[in-house]
Image (cartoon, helix red, strand yellow):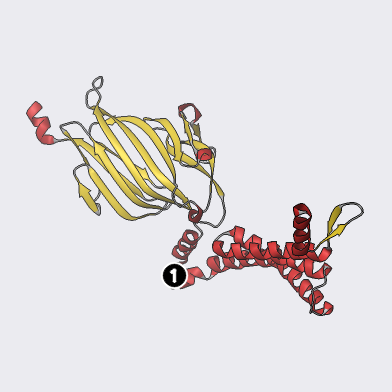
Amino acid sequence: MPAQLLKLIFALALGVQSNPESGSFSISVKTLAFSVTAVLLVSLAVSQFRRNSPWSFNLTLFSFFGLGIILLLADVPYLDRSFTHALADALIIASVLAFTVDLYLKERVLREVSSDVSKYLVGYRLPEEIQNRIRSLLQTRWIRRNCRIRLRLTESHGHAGRVGIEIVVSREVENITTEEASFQDRFSYERHLPQSLLEMRCDSADAKAQYQMNVAALVREKNDEPGVMQATGEVVKIPPVHETVGRCYEFTVRYSAEYSENYSDIYTFDLPTIGVIFEAECPPGFRVTLPPADVSAPNRWEYRKLFLPGEHIRYRWERIPEVANRRG
C-alpha cells in the first residue's frame, strides 16, 4: 500500500501516466517539456551570477535556443499556437545570430575602432609614428608585473681585475584578454657577451604550468637576427587575468657572466612591465649603482612606473676607489 501511494504521488506531481496492464510508467510530452523548461530557466538564473564570464554568455544562448525548440514543438496552455511559434522562431534566430554573426561582428568592430579611432582620441595632433605606437599599446595582450632582479657580484680569484655576476630575474605574466592564450617565455642576449644561461622555470599554483629546465644546451642563434642568442621556455596556457584571482604565473630566468671589475650592463624589457625591484649583493670594496628610483635603500632600488618594450635599466658596478687606494 505505501509503495502504491508513492507511485500515485509521483505520477500526480510529474504528470506521469501509468499503464496498469504492463506495470510501467510513461512521461507525457508536456511533462517532459515542462521539466526541460524548468532546467533551462534555472540555467538562466545561474548565469546571472557569472556575468563577466564567457561561460555565462554561452549558457544564456543555449537556454534561449532550448526554450525556442520547446515552444516550437510543445503546446503551451492559455497561449495561442501562432504566438508561441512566432516567439520560438524569434528565440532560435536570436540565439543563432548572437552566437555567430553578432559575436564576431562586435569583435571586428572593436578591433577596427581601437586601431583607427583610438590614436586620434589619445594622441590627437601627435606625429603619426607616435599615434601608431599608442595603437600598438592598446592592442597589448600580455603584461608583466612584480619584476624582481637580483644581482650577486663575486670576485674572480683566478683572473685579476675580473668579477663574476649571477642574475636571477623573476616576473609575473598576466593575460589581459578575455580568453585563454598560450605564452612562451624567451631570453635573448648578444652572442659576443660572456653570458651563460643556467635555468628557466615557471612557478604557479596551476600544476599544468609548472616547469624547470636547464636550457644551456637549448640556446640557439636567431634566424631573423644573426648575432643574437635565444632560449625559449615551455608553452604555458594562461587564462584571462579576471579568472586567475588567487594564483599567478611567475617566470624566472637565471644566468651568469664574467666581466671587468668596473663595468655596466643593461636589462631590457620585452613586454610592458609594471613594478620593478632591483637588489644587489656585492663583496666589500665594491658598489653597485642604478638610475634614481622611486624608493631607494642600500643595494635596493624600487621603480613603480611602467617600462615599455625596448626600454631598459642600466646597472653599474665598480671597485670603490678609496678601498683600492688602501690596498695599493
Seen in the picture, residue 132 relative to 271 is either above or below; the reply is below
Which residue appears farthest toward the front when viewing the image? 1
Between 198 and 237, the one lying in front of the other is 237
Q: Quadrant of the C terminus?
A: top left
Left or right side of 16 for 189 = left
Which residue appears farthest toward the right when viewing the image? 21
**Number of on-image labels:** 1
Which residue is drawn at the image coordinates 49% and 34% (left, top)? 211
Seen in the picture, residue 300 relative to 6 is either above or below; the reply is above
Q: Tell me if I can see residue 193 in this picture.
A: no
Which residue is drawn at the image coordinates 33% and 49% (left, top)? 276
- Where is residue 236 drawn, in percent x and y? 53, 42
- Where is residue 274 drawn, in percent x and y? 37, 53
Between 2 and 71, the one lying in front of the other is 2
Which residue is drawn at the image coordinates 50% and 42% (left, top)? 206
Between 293 and 31, the one lying in front of the other is 31
Residue linked to disc 1: 122
Which residue appears farthest toward the top when viewing the image? 158
Left or right side of 76 for 107 = left
Instruction: Identify the image quadrant of residue 85.
Output: bottom right
Seen in the picture, residue 199 relative to 118 is either above or below; the reply is above
Left or right side of 50 for 9 = right
Instruction: Identify the image quadrant of residue 21.
Output: bottom right
Asked which secondary structure carries label 1, the reply is helix
